[in-house]
Amino acid sequence: IDGGSGTDTLNASIATTITPGSIKNVENISLTFEAAKTFNATNVTGVTTFTDVGSTAAGTISNIDSTSTKLVVSDNAVGATFTYDASAVTGTADSIDLTLSNATGGATKITTITGAVETVNLTSSTSANSVRLNSDATTLNISGSADLTLAAASSILNLTTVIDASAATGAVSFAHDHTSSATAVTITGGSGNDSITLTGTNQVADTVSLGAGDDTLTF
């Protein structure tokens, strides 16, 4: 498939694992997973946005070739996995953009970012989002007007040393439990009514600033 010039969109339902022979010059690929299968993007180039939308099973988009490709999870209550090709995440400051839009998997359904990504820029949009977010990133930037709840079991909450939600206008809720007591953590809230819990190895050297809103901080 060659989308040629213009801004093109490919919509597909995925019921079996597939590796397309070639997709190029298609800027937007929206996939609806009907089974817990994999869309292998190893032969896909030129995509600006991968969207997992309306899926009824937790699918995987693998071998994404660039961290500049935006990721979207929309109308999804089952979780999703995005995996980067190793060549795309060789740096020490790899940053990706993830948008949640009516993602309601809660604590039991996992949205996973796999690969050596250092920063996740998360936008919470459309309506309230509640997910378990797994990633090895050490920085999490949160923005958007929709409320966001990150489940306590989210691995990103064990590893981040910076969580910056200063650009968020919706309420942000999470429990942060950094796994290393030797590492100071900086948490910044947004203008919504945030609810932040510090547990486990969080320590006196940590910095918390919750900004505007009617915020709650629990130790």
Image (cartoon, rainbow, N blue to C red):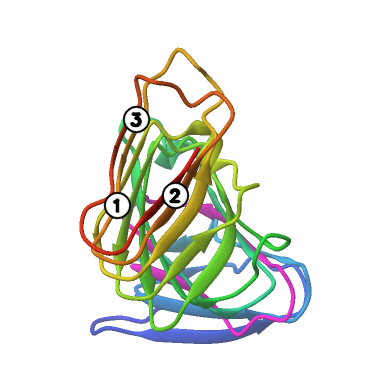
Instruction: Name the amino acid type tagged 1.
Output: Gly
Location of mark 3 (residue): 91
Q: Which mark is residue 216?
A: none
Residue 147 image offset from top left, x and y in percent: 41, 72
Are the two marked residues, 2 and 1, in contact with CB atoms closer than 8 angstroms?
A: yes
Q: Residue at x 54, y 23 (%)?
A: 201
- Looking at the picture, how far across and down is residue 10, in whole percent? 47, 84
Residue 78 counted in the magenta span = no
Q: Secondary structure at mark 3?
A: loop
| Mark sitting on residue 196 | 2
CB within 8 Å, label 1 to label 3? no
Is residue 26 at all visible to an observer of this figure? no
195 relative to 144 in the view: left or right: right
Q: Position of residue 139 (x, y in %)?
A: 36, 39
Classify 58 as above or below 190: below
Distance, label 2 to label 3, CA atoms, is 31 Å
Q: Give me the residue at 55% from left, 60% from top.
A: 41
Q: Earlier in the sequence, mark 1 or mark 3?
A: 3
How many residues crowd around disc 2 within 10 Å: few (fewer than 14), some, or many (20 or more)?
A: many
Instruction: Please state which of the two labelled residues, at mark 1 or mark 3, is closer to the viewer.
Output: 1
Q: Is residue 74 visible?
A: yes
Per the image, label 2 sits on a secondary structure element best described as strand
- Marks 2, 3: nearer the viewer: 2
The residue lying toward the viewer, choosing from 132 and 173, is 173
Of pointers 2 and 1, the one earlier in the residue sequence: 1
Type of amino acid at the residue the image marks with label 2:
Ile
Mark 2 or mark 3, earlier in chain: 3
Please report the bounds of the magenta region as a residue range. Answer: 48-70
Give SS at disc 1.
loop
Name the residue that disc number 1 marks. Answer: 189
Q: Choose top left, top right, bottom left or bottom right for residue 111.
A: bottom right
Q: Position of residue 193 (x, y in %)?
A: 34, 65
